Amino acid sequence: MIEVTGLRNQFGSLVVHDNLDLQVRRGEILAVVGGSGSGKSVLLRSIIGLHRPSAGSVRLNGIDMLSADDSARQAVEQNIGVLFQKGALYSSLDVIENVMLPLREHSDLDERSIRDLAMSKLALVGLRTDVANTTVQSLSGGMIKRVALARALILEPQILFLDEPTAGLDPVGANAFDDLLLTIQRALGLTVFLVTHDLDSLYKVSDRIAVLAEKRVLVVDTPERVANFDEPWIQSYFQGPRGRAAQVSQQQEKEHGN
Ligand code: ADP
Ligand code: MG
C-alpha cells in the first residue's frame, strides 16, 4: 500500500534520511519509532506529499506520487486521512465544522448531507452528538484527538496516518484511544501508518514496528522480533524498564482474553 524506496531528505547540511526503504502492507498497522529528531514526522510528511524529498520514490497504492500528474495524485490524496501531532483543529470553527471541512473542499455534496456524514463520523469515534456545536477550546485532550480522527476519516480513506496520537494524553485516555483505533482499523480495513513514542500503544496496536535510526529504517518486523533485535538503541528502548513493563502488561492483557 505504501512503498518508499531510496528516500533521501536533507535540510542544508543536515541529512535526515539517506537511502531509506520502507513498505507498508495493505490492512496492517505499522508503527514507526525512533529517537526524537530521527525523522519520523519528516518521513510521514514525505509520504503524504507535504514535504518533497531530496531523492527517492514514494508509491501509494501503486501510484508514484512524485511523478504522477495532478489528477492522479489528488485521487490518491483523497484516499488518505491524516491525524497530525496535537490534532491541528481550527479554533475558529466549532467541532462539527472542523469535521465537515474536507468534504466542503473535496465534494459537491449539499450542506445537509455533509453535516449528516460529519455527525456519523463523530458517532464512529465515540463522541456524543451534543459535542458537535461546542468550541474546540472546550474539548479535553482526548476529545480533540477523537474529533481530529473523525475529520481524518470523513473522506473514507483507505490509509490513515497518525503522528503521535496519544502524546499528551493520560494513560487512561491513551488506552481508550488505542482501543478506538484498533476497532476502527478492523471495522474499516484501514492501512495505518502510526508514529508513536508510546510503548503501551506499540505493543497493543502494531502488527509490525519499523525502527528509524541512522537515517534509515534499521529493522521492520513484529513487536516481539524487534524487541529482541541486537542493536544498542533498540535494546535500551525495548528492554529498558518502561519497555519491559509495557511488554509484560500487554502479555497479561492477551492472557486475560482481551
Ligand atoms: P521526529 O523524529 O522527532 O519527528 P522530525 O522528523 O520532526 O523528527 O525532524 C527530523 C530532523 O529534521 C530534526 O533535526 C528537525 O529539526 C529537522 N527538520 C524537520 N523539518 C525541517 C525543516 N522544514 N527545515 C529544517 N529542518 C527540519
Ligand atoms: Mg515528530
Image: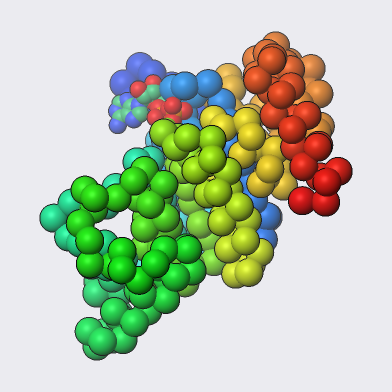
Q: Position of residue 174 (x, y in %)?
A: 52, 41
Quadrant where ligand 1 appears? top left
Residue drawn at x 24%, y 50% is 138
Q: Name the quadrant containing residue 146.
A: bottom left
116 vs 16, nearest the viewer: 116
Residue drawn at x 44%, y 37% is 169
Horizontal relation, residue 206 to residue 171: left or right: right
Up/down of 181 relative to 11, above or below? below
Asked whether residue 98 appears in the rendered view, the answer is no
Q: Position of residue 30 (x, y in %)?
A: 64, 46
For the rendered model, the colour scheme is rainbow
Horizontal relation, residue 2 to residue 166: left or right: right
Residue drawn at x 69%, y 15% is 241
Give the residue at the far left of this rendering: 92
Up/down of 15 relative to 136, above or below? above
Give the residue at the far right of this rendering: 255
**Location of the N terminus (image quadrant):** bottom right
Horizontal relation, residue 138 to residue 249: left or right: left
76 vs 119, nearest the viewer: 119
Give the number of callouts: 0
Up/down of 199 relative to 101, above or below? above
Asked whether residue 123 appears in the rendered view, the answer is yes
Q: Position of residue 225 (x, y in %)?
A: 81, 32
Residue drawn at x 58%, y 43% is 175
Q: Position of residue 168 (x, y in %)?
A: 41, 33
